[in-house]
Image (cartoon, rainbow, N blue to C red):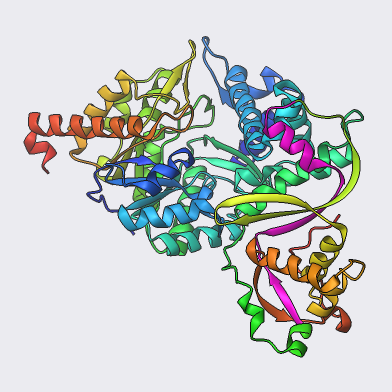
Amino acid sequence: MNAPRLALGHGIGLRTKHFPEFLARRPAVDWVEAVTENFMAPGGRPIAVLEKVRREVPVVLHGVSLSIGSVDPIPERYLAELGRLVHRIEPALVSDHLCWGTHRGQYLHDLLPLPYTEEALAHVARRVEQVQERIGRPLLLENPSTYVSFRDSTMTEWEFLGELSRRSGCGILLDVNNVYVSARNFGYDPLAYLDGLPMDRVGYLHLAGHQDRGRYLLDTHDGAVPPPVWALYREVLHRLGPVPTLVEWDDRIPPLEEVVAESQRAASIEAQELEASPRRLAS
Amino acid sequence: MTLAETQALFRRAITSAEPLSAKRLETCFAGSDALPAAERVSLYAEMYLSRLTEALRVTYPNLSRLLGDGPFAALSRDYLRRYPSRHHDVGEVGRKLATFLRRYPDPERPDLADLAELEWARQEVFFAPPAAPKGAELLSGLSQEAFLRSGLALSPALRLLVLDHDATALWRRIENGEPADPPRSERSVVAVWRNGFEVFHGALAADEALALEGAARGLDLARICAAFAAREDPAEAAHAALASWFAEGWIVGLAAGALARRGRRKAPAQSERR
């Protein structure tokens, strides 16, 4: 099972604050991404809005609670609800994060990093296969933004993610902001990350904002995409060609048109890069 | 260190009341001179508390306004130690807050638990499964005998709360940005429901509350309407109550009535009684 790279175009995250505008008119976006867990409840406005939006544009389901790296078994309740939502929405893609966030039944509601070891790799690969079998489609996993690493790690994050993708068939959701944040927090070159990752496994991209807290960067999704992330995005496009790209904005959310404008800026940058390097980008 | 040991230590470092020693953390985590391992791990601990406190604030907007930022954050911290999240939906983390507040009441504001119960019910009905409300014509084709023997299927987006304080008045004052009155002990039955995508709540008269509780328990209409027997015109009162239930979208169908007479089935989940 391998994740395809679809020609989705440029999208934005579907957020509660923007529901009225999404209901009133279709914003100028090619697709939207919905946080899976926010739409698992069988009733209420969120799922009604998502079903309406789904009739107009493709939807990608993006989870935050799968906890693919946890040593806890994946809860049957979660898999059942995920399966029901996938069946109901028929998303273009289904993604979550390379992380863990549950322990002994407790949800920490965070995207906690894994030690990049052979043990963790085998463990996560088995669980990816379990999820993919359950939902009948490939899963894409996103590189997290991280603030701490482990003494036991024997490989880099990009080596881990690349090998995981090869073993399990999962796709990669490459969060460009997270690459930048983690690279700054650990002092490595973000281009080394891009050069080491099997880019043919990348299904789509995330762009977002972060905060500079002096001694570290914090992944906050509370502002416009910063210039260094746009620069890294161009580097990704050089290596990858046209690729579905989504702008995330989760805190201090501005009016919808501002988020849409950020997505259109991504489309414009992609068009510029395509014009500059047509051979690579048209491939 | 195995993956299981790593995750157990990480969880402890994030959630424990007392921070782990830097020496202990450095057996597992790597840092740098600029940002040592213990400080890096503490970022996750801070984010854990702030994220879940924010989730509680979203569920309990008026409780958090009443308490203010600092006290609400302290309440969240204490609550999360007693009731950590057990659900993949972060919105579920506050499910036990009213229980917690009843167990550890604030002596100056014993009505906090009732306010929390009201706000939780408002969230719960918002996400309840959909069910198409029926109009009063549902009953119009029934013979008098069939009418009296029928029960009512209530909307899954309707809750009945039995509260010890006037939480609806408190909720309204906070919602309007007015100062809260002192707690007022007053037993009340409050209906909380969704109509379309809007959530409403309101206190019920004692006999109407009894009637609705009966409907939720599966009683037939003869017994439901008997709740109004003390009114000057019981039939008119029962008719008015039923008409308003239809108008609010509380009734989604007919059910086999007289369940209480058979006495074998449990009350349906709509009835939330302490």
Q: Relative to A214, does residue B241 appear above or below in the rendering? A: below
Describe residue B129's horizontal placement relative to residue B161 as left or right: left
Q: Relative to A22, does residue B152 appear above or below in the rendering? A: below
Across and down, in percent, residue B87 comes to: 65, 49
**Residue A192 seen in render:** yes
For the residue pair A42 and A198, the one nearer the viewer reads as A42
Residue found at x 26% / y 43%? A244
Number of callouts: 0
Q: Relative to A63, does residue B145 appear above or below in the rendering? A: below
**Residue A126 seen in render:** no
Residue found at x 68% / y 43%? B93
Q: Quadrant of the N terminus of chain B?
A: top right
Across and down, in percent, residue B189 comes to: 83, 53
Q: For the magenta stretch, what is the residue range?
A: B150-178
Residue found at x 8% / y 28%? A276
Let me know if residue A275 is in the magenta part: no
Q: Quadrant of residue A100?
A: top right
For the residue pair A198 and A138, the one nearer the viewer reads as A138
Looking at this rendering, what residue extends furthest in the front direction?
A: B232
Across and down, in percent, residue B186 comes to: 90, 44
Q: Quadrant of residue A175?
A: top left
Let me know if residue B163 is in the magenta part: yes
Across and down, in percent, residue A19 comes to: 44, 44
Q: Quadrant of the C terminus of chain B?
A: bottom right
Residue found at x 79% / y 78%? B221
Describe residue A147's horizontal placement relative to residue A25 as left or right: right
